[in-house]
Amino acid sequence: MLTGHPPLYLASKSPRRHDLLKAAGITFKVIDIDVPEDHPADMEVEDIPLYLARKKAEAAIPLIDHQSLVLTADSVVILDDRIYGKPLDKDEAAQMISALAGRHHLVITGVFIGNHKRGVGFSDYTSVWIEPMTADEIEYYVRTFPPLDKAGAYGIQDWIGWTKVSRIEGSYANVMGLPIHKVYETLATWNEQE
């Protein structure tokens, strides 16, 4: 169990981020923020996740006391320089999965950890290869698994991850939504940076 860092607040509704922090032995409380996930139109796609994580942190930090930290994150799926965020409905989810199937794409998660005095931001990159999928397989996935709360409309920890992801390069946890190894190291050394 990780100790020695200030009390941590997670500003995320993602159950996968909750699970990853718990699995790593990191104690935290959840705070609720509602921040529009928009960004400047001319921003490089690789910079968007960290920009959004920082934007969420700016909304969350005023809600915590001066002895605590906040953790925010944002994940995107990128294919052909296009961002595949959370789908609006099951039809869009099916379109996203169809575009990703048989291709290699990049998952980037931007993370920001900070308090009233300072903050640390970083991004993590994972490459993912998804095997081709039939229309029936895509329809089965969208109907059976909840795709609407996931960037790219899929979860690596469920059916697509087990049956269709043939290869990844980088952190598996990053594809789930949080590069927990980097979060752990940042928290473990937080007091040393003071």
Image (cartoon, rainbow, N blue to C red):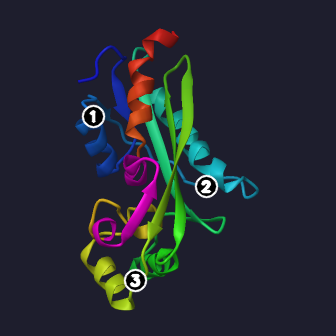
Identify the residue shown where x is 39% and y is 35%. 181
Give, as a single range, the part of the protein colored magenta: 160-177
| 101 to 47, vertically: above or below | below
Q: Residue furthest right?
A: 42
Q: Amino acid at mark 3?
A: Met
Residue that carries the numbered disc 2 in the rendered image? 38
| Mark 2 residue element | loop
The numbered dot on residue 24 is 1
Return the x and y of residue 75 as percentages of the image width and height: 49, 52
> Tag 1 or tag 2, which sits nearer the N-term?
1
Q: Amino acid at mark 2?
A: Asp
Left or right, 19 with reference to 85: left
| Mark 3 residue element | loop
Residue that carries the numbered disc 3 in the rendered image? 133
Report the Cα–Cα distance between label 2 and label 1. 30 Å
Question: Closer to us: mark 2 or mark 1?
Answer: 1
